[in-house]
Image (tube, rainbow, N blue to C red):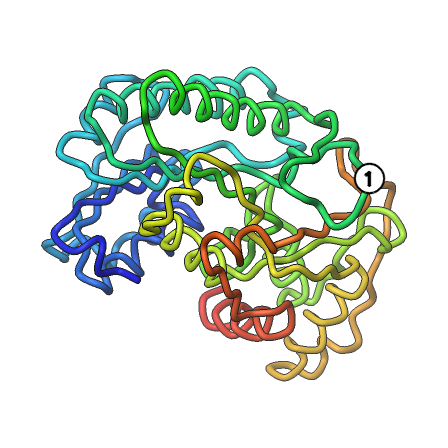
Amino acid sequence: MFHNLQNKTVLVTGGAGFIGSNLCEVLLANSIKTVCLDNFSTGKRKNIEPFLGNSDFKLIEGDIRNLEDCKKACKDVDYILHEAALGSVPRSINDPITTNDVNVSGFLNMLVAAKDAQVKRFVYAASSSTYGDHEALPKVEDVIGKPLSPYAITKYVNELYADIFQKTYGLDTIGLRYFNVFGKRQDPDGAYAAVIPLFVKQFINKESPIINGDGSYSRDFTYIDNVVQMNILALTTTNQEALNTVYNVAYGDRTTLLQLANVLKSNLSEFDSTIQDIDIKHRENRVGDIPHSLASIEKAKKLLNYNPKFNINSGIKEAVKWYWKNL
């Protein structure tokens, strides 16, 4: 899978973040020259510390909202994995302007820089939030609804811009609609922590996790290794039909939030049996949340030979092991 990248250079924007650092790790493990662009607003220096002594790794501290930083990062780069963004639906509701600046203006800066540097392919993080109020399950790439949050709007605009840049400038792009990614290095701290690391931290601290609503909302939780696989497939495919489109990145199964909390409790109880006795609490549903999310991954299987290895149970087992050692 990596032979197409030999003697090439890959830029990972947001490379010190959760997904970005996992991508950097795999690229470097396969001796691929890797450039990381990050402003450390949400990324963590500790995520890339193990790479700093690697001669194949280069760190550029910069902001995608600054076009010159983008141009500097794209210099002599062959491929781009664009992960830099401000995630979180609630954050976008609280501060839509900053979310738009990073996710739309920053995205456009990166497209312009990639075009000017004659980058071969631009693979970017899209989002399952693009499906919005469309209720049918599973989610199929060519049928979407209206966005339910400022964040969702920004990620849909990314897809529109990518399409225009291919048609107007010939820049090949692939968008990856991530579905609730989780795994090692996902930050459990802060106001906008994702549900899995947040619940793990609460259980470890002997606190009751709080579920929004009655726990019946469901998600297609996707382990990080499946996401890394999909990024590398998108970067290296030689199938022309697979380019200039978007794909769901998921496992293709759904888990309710109550089921999730109980799976986490069960796995963590193997390390500390008293966790089994912690109660799970509930509160009102959150504004902007969609009730259910489930992806069809048939398109990715057909065009990119995507074959996710980790379901929710095997992924949680790996994630919990990492958190137990590192929290």
Is 128 left, or right, of 64 in this rendering? right
Front one among 263 and 270: 263
Residue at the (70%, 62%) spot, across then down: 253
- Residue 197 position within the rendered picture, expressed as x and y whole percent measured from the top left: 59, 57
Crowd around label 1: few <14 · some 14–19 · many ≥20 (10 Å):
some
* Residue found at the far right of this picture: 214
Number of numbered labels in the structure image: 1
Q: Quadrant of the N terminus?
A: bottom left
Front one among 307 and 253: 307
- Residue 316 position within the rendered picture, expressed as x and y whole percent measured from the top left: 60, 69
Circle 1 is placed at which residue position?
135
- Residue 129 position within the rendered picture, expressed as x and y whole percent measured from the top left: 65, 36
Front one among 40 and 36: 36
Residue at the (27%, 26%) spot, across then down: 114
Is 185 left, or right, of 292 in this rendering? left
- Residue 216 position within the rendered picture, expressed as x and y whole percent measured from the top left: 86, 55
Front one among 265 and 81: 81
Q: Is residue 48 above or below residue 146?
A: below
Q: Amino acid at mark 1?
A: Glu
Residue at the (32%, 47%) spot, across then down: 45
Residue at the (73%, 25%) spot, across then down: 146
Is 80 left, or right, of 234 in this rendering? left
Q: Is residue 317 above or below residue 188?
A: below
Q: Secondary structure at mark 1?
A: loop
